[in-house]
Image (cartoon, helix red, strand yellow):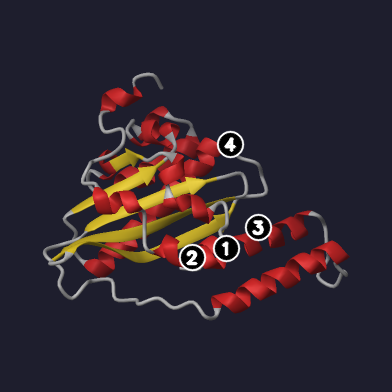
Amino acid sequence: MLSPVTIRYKICLQDLWASGVGWDDELSEEQIKMWKGYVHEMNQLIEFRLARMIKPEDSLGDPQLHGFSDASESALGSVIWLKWNTSHGVELKFVIAKSLVAPLKQRSIPRLELTAAVVMARLALLVLQVVGRVSTMKFWTDSEVVLAWVRSPARTFKPFVSARVQEIQDALPGFSKEFCYVPSQLNPADALTKPIKPSELQGWINGPDFLLNSSQDGFWGTDNDFDFL
């Protein structure tokens, strides 16, 4: 739940390792100042509180599962919410998020986005083991390339892409058909690749507003949307 903040520390630690700084080497004044600021942030995180009940007491029926993934040159990640119908309206419940620093070996953004989608598939399977049953599932990405990949036979791609597309398609029956496009500015997984401040964390945990106000299948919902790829 703290991943949108703590991913910054992971990225900076990786940068230190990549620069050749040894375990016992003294940091520069600039680096010391930066990490003291992070310690101050960490102390703010100690005060963060979140109710962990993921099923509202007045829920009606099974929830929808909504997963989001994103990647940048420095990090990738995924997050999942459950969308419940309740007697007082729609309610979103944060379930789980995972963020990772991008490999030091440079990869293209589409490949990183695909890796983030694999993380999303694995988290979805984990959530389903706990929740048991959901009414529908939607998996959101802002990568049009990933959408085209997961809707195509895995065997048509080279090994890196093929293996990851196959894992996504094998994860659940019809999994790849549940992928939807979300504009980057509305993708909450963006916070897992571009860190936010501790003061913004509660708003992020509450989930994306468009899920509260929409029942659409996706911003781009048909196979014809990808004919140009």
Q: Which residue is mark 1?
A: 197
In space, the residues marked 3 and 1 are separated at their CA atoms by 15 Å
Q: Mark 2 Cα within 10 Å, few/some/many (few <14, many 20+)?
A: some
Q: Earlier in the sequence, mark 3 or mark 4?
A: 3
The quadrant of the rendering that contains the C terminus is top left
Circle 3 SS class: helix
User: In the image, what residue occupies the spot 62% across and 60% down?
Assistant: 8
Three-letter amino acid code of the residue under disc 4: Ser
Q: Residue furthest top?
A: 228
User: In the image, what residue occupies the spot 57% across and 57% down?
Assistant: 195
Q: Which percent across, then down, holds residue 82?
A: 27, 61
Report whether 81 appears left or right of 26. left
Circle 1 SS class: loop
Q: Earlier in the sequence, mark 3 or mark 1?
A: 3
Q: In front: mark 3 or mark 2?
A: 2
Q: Which residue is mark 4?
A: 108
Q: Earlier in the sequence, mark 2 or mark 4?
A: 4
Of residues 114 and 204, the one nearer the viewer is: 204
In the rendered image, the vertical position of residue 146 relative to residue 204, given as above or below: above
Q: Earlier in the sequence, mark 3 or mark 2?
A: 3
In space, the residues marked 3 and 4 are separated at their CA atoms by 18 Å
In space, the residues marked 4 and 1 are separated at their CA atoms by 27 Å
